Structure formats: structure tokens, C-alpha cells
């Protein structure tokens, strides 16, 4: 399966915000890989907001992102982060195709996946995603299991990193000896570690799940590519 391993672990994080700097350092420290979903049309420090506790969420400028995310995957998150289900087909196409083209040109890599803004999608959005050459698209649905998804354009995660059962799932996955492929998929936004004061919790999780010989650690594309379909 994955380098002759039956278990794979991957992560997916959105929005290209400043907390990613600390998060990427943690990923690299523990030998983990993630996919970062970016909005090229608003990827600027001018795009920011403050939560109720006064914590700033600020997107980063594009300059320096190639170096920051080296070794990880860049994926589409739409040009301007709208609810794609509220627009006509041409607008959806513009949001996805332009974001994909911008990111491919800047990072010098082929992009094959995305995360839906707000997790929202419908038949039209999925069809456009496929039309622009995307093979997978992550939702915000959690399965709480490790079975492979039936439809990569309606890709669920195992769980959000803030799930109460995160460590229980980690232990279940680590101890499993499957004869069929299993995927542990975690998603979130790195600003949530500031909101929830959970940086220590995510590092504890990384410390536990990392460095296991029977687990393949890859980006979303690396773990899903064996299941891509053409057309």
C-alpha cells in the first residue's frame, strides 16, 4: 500500500495564517506532513480579524511561504473563501481555477486537491472541482474511523484536532494491525491552538503518533494519490 504499510497518517490545515509558523515547526520536529489550503486572492497580512478574546488571526503575505511550507503540500481553498454553494457555475470555476493557477505558479508545483471553504459543497461545486483538475476535496465532516473514503470529492476527516476523543483515536490507530488500508486524517486551523490554549495538547498528540515504523506519514496527496481516478 503506502511503502508496504497498511496505515497512513495525514493532516489538513486552512487559511495560511501566522500561527502556521509555529505549527510547521512542530510538524517538522516530529517528522509529520500536512496539507495547507490557501486562498491566493486574499493571502495578505491586510486580511485579518480578532476573536472575542482579542487574539489576532492574520493571513500571511505570499513572500516566504514557499520556504515555510517546504516539504508539505499546498492545496486550493478558493480564491477568496466564499460559500461556493451560493454562486453560479462560472463564479465557482473562477474561484477554483484561478486559485489553483496562482498557487501552482507561485509554488512551482502541481496541485491536485482542495478543502471546501466552510466545508460547504454541492453537486455543481464538486463537478467544477473535478473540471479544474482536482482529485480530492476535504469537507468538515468527521467519521471517527479510519476507513478509506468512498468519494474523494466529498472527503471526510477522521476528526478535528479539537475532538475530545483525539487521543483515544490515536491509541486505537497506533495499536491496530489491519489487513486493509487505514487512514487517520486530522484537520483544523492553527489559530485554534491559540484560541483553546491547546499547543501542548497537539504536541502531545504528535509525540504519541509520530515515529512509528508501521505508519506512513504523508501529505493528503501522498496518501490519496493511489486512489485517484482519471476523468
Image (spheres, grey):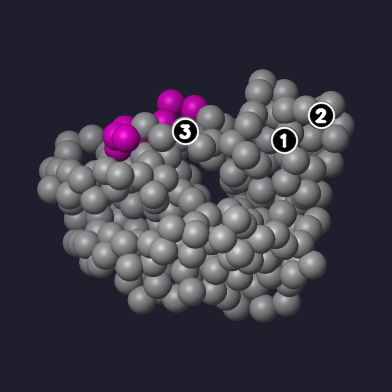
Q: Confirm or deny contact between disc 2 and disc 1 (CB under 8 A).
A: no
Depth check: 52 or 22 in front?
52
Q: Which residue is mark 3?
A: 141
Could you classify mark 2 by the number of other residues whose Cα lies within 10 Å: few (under 14), some (14-19), or many (20 or more)? few
Which residue corresponds to the image point at 66% horizontal and 48% vertical from the top-left? 77
Depth check: 55 or 23 in front?
55
Most extreme residue toward the top, as rendered? 123
Q: Regarding mark 2 in the picture, which secondary structure is present there?
A: loop
Compared to 196, does 129 lie above or below?
Answer: above
Q: Give the spatial CA distance, label 3 vs label 1.
A: 16 Å
Could you classify mark 1 by the number of other residues whose Cα lies within 10 Å: few (under 14), some (14-19), or many (20 or more)? some
Per the image, is 148 magenta?
yes
Q: Confirm or deny contact between disc 3 and disc 1 (CB under 8 A).
A: no
- Which quarter of the figure has residue 204? bottom left
Q: Regarding mark 3 in the picture, which secondary structure is present there?
A: strand
Percent x, y of residue 49:
70, 59
Which residue corresponds to the image point at 38% horizontal and 62% vertical from the top-left? 198
Compared to 110, does 156 lie above or below?
Answer: above
Which residues are the magenta region?
Answer: 144-151
Name the disc covering residue 83, or none: 1
Give the position of the C terminus as an image quadrant: top right
Could you classify mark 3 by the number of other residues whose Cα lies within 10 Å: few (under 14), some (14-19), or many (20 or more)? some
Name the disc covering residue 92, or none: none
Q: Regarding mark 1 in the picture, which secondary structure is present there?
A: loop
Q: Which residue is mark 2?
A: 87
Percent x, y of residue 39:
72, 54
Q: From the viewer's perspective, tell me whether residue 58 is left or right of residue 187.
A: right
Amino acid at each position: 500500500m503506502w511503502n508496504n504499510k497498511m496505515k497512513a497518517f495525514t493532516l489538513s490545515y486552512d487559511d495560511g495564517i501566522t500561527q502556521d509558523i509555529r505549527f510547521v515547526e512542530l510538524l517538522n520536529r516530529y517528522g509529520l506532513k500536512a496539507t495547507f489550503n490557501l486562498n491566493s486572492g486574499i493571502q495578505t497580512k491586510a486580511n485579518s480579524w480578532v476573536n472575542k478574546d482579542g487574539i489576532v488571526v492574520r493571513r500571511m503575505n505570499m513572500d516566504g511561504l514557499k520556504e515555510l511550507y517546504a516539504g508539505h503540500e499546498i492545496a486550493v481553498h478558493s480564491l477568496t473563501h466564499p460559500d461556493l454553494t451560493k454562486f453560479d457555475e462560472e463564479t465557482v470555476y473562477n474561484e477554483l481555477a484561478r486559485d489553483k493557477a496562482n498557487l501552482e505558479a507561485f509554488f512551482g508545483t502541481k496541485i491536485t486537491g482542495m478543502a471546501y471553504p466552510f466545508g460547504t459543497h454541492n453537486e455543481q461545486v464538486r463537478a467544477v472541482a473535478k473540471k479544474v483538475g482536482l482529485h480530492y476535496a476535504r469537507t468538515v465532516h468527521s467519521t471517527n474511523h479510519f476507513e478509506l473514503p468512498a468519494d474523494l470529492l466529498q472527503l471526510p476527516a477522521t476528526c478535528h484536532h479539537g475532538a475530545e476523543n483525539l487521543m483515544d483515536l490515536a491509541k486505537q490507530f497506533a495499536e491496530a494491525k489491519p489487513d486493509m488500508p487505514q487512514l487517520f486524517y486530522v484537520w483544523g486551523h492553527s489559530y485554534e491552538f491559540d484560541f483553546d490554549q491547546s499547543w501542548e495538547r497537539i504536541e502531545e498528540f504528535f509525540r504519541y503518533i509520530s515515529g512509528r515504523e508501521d505508519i506512513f506519514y504523508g501529505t493528503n496527496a501522498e496518501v490519496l494519490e493511489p486512489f485517484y481516478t482519471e476523468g
